[in-house]
Every structure is written in structure tokens, then in C-alpha cells.
Amino acid sequence: MQTTILPSTLGGVILAPASKSSMQRACAAALLRAGQTIIRHPGHSNDDKAALGVIRDLGAEVTELPDGSLRVGSEGIVQDAAAGQELLEVNCGESGLGLRMFAPIFALSGRTIRVKGEGSLLKRPMDFFDEVFPQLGIRVMSNGGKLPLEIQGPLRPRNIEIDGSLSSQFLTGLLFAFAAAGAPGVSIRVRDLKSKPYIDLTLQVMRCFGWEVENRDYAEFLFPAERQSGDPAYTVEGDWSGGAFLLVAGAIAGPIRVKGLDEWSTQADKAILQALCDCGAQLEIGEEAMLAGPPDGSANSAGVQVPVLTAFRFDATDCPDLFPPLVALAAFCAGTTEITGVSRLAHKESDRGLTLQEEFAKMGVRIELEGDKMLVLGGQGVRGAVVHSRHDHRIAMACAVAALKADGAVVIEDAEAIDKSYPDFYEDLRVLGGNVEIS
């Protein structure tokens, strides 16, 4: 699919999409919680659909209610070592979170579970399974550290130490699995944990479902003697990852108002607010919506708008998914923007540091990579061009946002990559006044 974005001025109000980070964690918790759970404001991205497919494969019944909420009925996962020869295949789609989070949960069962995936997930390294699972009594076979995986439990919680520098998602799965298995007095120690806000989100979801885990400064996590009563209903948060693209679009081509984003959320990508403040964008946080828009500027003698957004510095180590919208924002900021945390980008849907450099170069935006730093030389204008998503949803959205104030049409190839996280993105741009053509 190709999508063409023509220069546009945006306005109006839009509702942020549901957070797939929140939605997938809710699916895991609903599976592990014996009984009925209501999930309100569920997401419908490809990653969300994959998570729902996984919990169905593991025995949960999922029913859509008239108001759009989902009712999940589950008996939990019963540890049954005698079931080891019974093979079950599950597919995590293209979701890195889904695979890393659900793998320890799969291991609660004694069944042999073959885990498959699609697209870029087939290329992403999963060596930590091979390193950690044997310590927990879990048999694991992988394809050289990649999918497909074959896992057989049951998992036996015990004191372990893991490396948290690559991803917090595996820790999320262990936290869920240990809590569900019952691990009183057991601890997970973590070295060099990255993306701490995502662990805050995990602990928040677990708390809603009745699991209180003691967090000792992100270096150690202790499990209680018993589970508390939890809430049988959970409301999925608005997505700060998708919302970041909308807010940046407003700062470049707005102003617009975005509803459904909680300023008190634990989601890491809420940090986009700091970048918008630092570059001088209009930003107002109201009770019902957030306003994002460009600052007042002036036209030069040729009638061209002078860049009034200014370059900024930003540490994205704990929120690497913000790199794409930050690059789109920095392209319109006068001066050189410095973003650190590039080392977190190599094993995303694409090698995002290089992909951003190469695709934005097609639009005339120069990006330099210096070790863990990315430098974006902004304020020089954005050209119309033909770009490619590289099968990466966030690259597609970043190019689309930058295209809103390019000097001509930007054509995005493989534009359907957005379905992974925000399938309504192009339509939402249209609602806001964006000139978007899909073919």
C-alpha cells in the first residue's frame, strides 16, 4: 500500500488510540486471573489482536460486549508437568512485547509450547531465554537464539539475577509469571535496567489485578506471600506512543487537541511533553484534552515561514520508541537537535537509527550518528520524496508527520506498517484536516 501525504494545515480534536503496552499487559493479567475480567477501551492494532489470539490459544474465552469492551473468562494456567508431551502452537505476530512477556507465562504450563512469529520478529534476538529459562527448570529450544522457540515448563520460581540492559519486556513476563505461580520470599535481581517506566506500567497493571510486588529501586523485585483481591475491570490507557505522533503533528502543522492521554500515566513516552516544551511548541494541558501547536512565527520577504521551533537535547534511553516522532519534530527545529540512546534502536522492527537516517535523507534532512548520540540538523526544510517504511510502523508515522509541512508530496511505500500499533493513523490525520491519499 502507498500513502501520499500532501502539505497540510491541521486543526480540530482527536482521540488518542488505545495503548498497546497497556492492552497487552491487560490481556496477560486477564489470562492469569481466574474468573471474569472486563477490559474497557481495548485496542485493535495487530499487536493487540496477536495478544488476544495468544490468550485464546491458552484457554481464555474472549467476548466483545455491546459497548465495545471485552469480557475475558479464564481459569488461569494450571501447572501440569504430566502434560509435557502435549504440543501447543501459538503465534505472537510481530510483537516483541508479546513474545518476551508471554514466554515466561507459557512456561507456567507443563505443556510443550511452540512459539511462532511473523515479519521482523523472526530476526530479533532472544538469547536471554536460553540464558535464564534453564535456571527456572524450563526446557527451551530456539533457532540460534531466534524464533521459533519451543518451551516446556512448569516454571519453578527461585531467586535469579537477570541483565535488564537489552529490554524490560522479559522482566515484565517474569514478574507476571512469578506472581501467578506464587513466589513468596523469592526475588528477581536486575542489573542495569533500561526502560524503567515500562516496569512502572507493568507493576501498575499487576496491582489492579491484585498482585503487589515490592520494587526495591528497580534493582530487586520481591513477591508477597499471597495475592490480594483485584479489580474485575480494567480500562486500557490512551497511548502515549501513538499520541506522541499526534502531538508532534500539532506542533508542526496545527494547532490540534488530543484527548485520552493521562498526564499522570507511567508510560515512558509521556516524556514527549518535555521535548515539546524544550523546542518552544505551544503546549496546554487541559482537563479534557491537550493542545499542541507551533509557536507564533513570522514570514520572511519571500513569504516563507521562518522556523521558530528551536533545537533541543533529549535523552531517549528509557523511551526509545520516541526516536521517530522526535526526529520528525527536530527536522523543523532551527539548529542541531541531540538525542541520546541510539544503542536501544538496533533490535526494533528495523535498525531505527540507520533507517531514520536513510529515509529522512530522502526528504533532505541530515542526521548524523555518533556512538549513542543522534544529531538532527533541522530547520533547513523538508523535501517531497518517495520514502519506505522498512516494514516499521513508527518509521511510516514519522515520515507522514514530517510530510505535513514538506515542500511537496511525500509518498510512503509499505504504508500499511502502521497496522502494527495504530491502524487508524492516516484516517485520524484526515479527520484533523490532513491531505492524505491512500492507494
Image: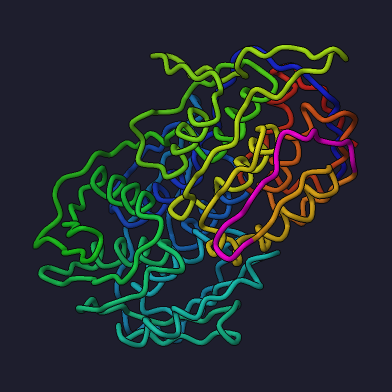
Q: Which residue is drawn at 25% across and 60% down?
A: 218
> Is residue 425 inside the magenta stretch?
no
Figure quadrant of residue 271: top left
Q: Quadrant of the C terminus?
A: top right
Q: In the rendered view, does 280 fall on the left or right side of 357?
A: left
Q: In which quarter of the image is the N terminus?
A: top right
> Is residue 381 inside the magenta stretch?
yes
Which residues are drawn in magenta?
370-385
Figure quadrant of residue 15: top right
Please say if 68 is above or below 150. above
In this rendered view, identify the residue nearer to me: 348 or 377. 377
Please say if 105 is above or below 334. below
Q: Where is residue 141 in the image (x, y as percent from the top left)?
A: 51, 87
Q: Position of residue 160 (x, y in %)?
A: 25, 79
In this rendered view, identify the residue nearer to me: 416 or 241. 241
Q: Position of residue 222 (x, y in %)?
A: 16, 64
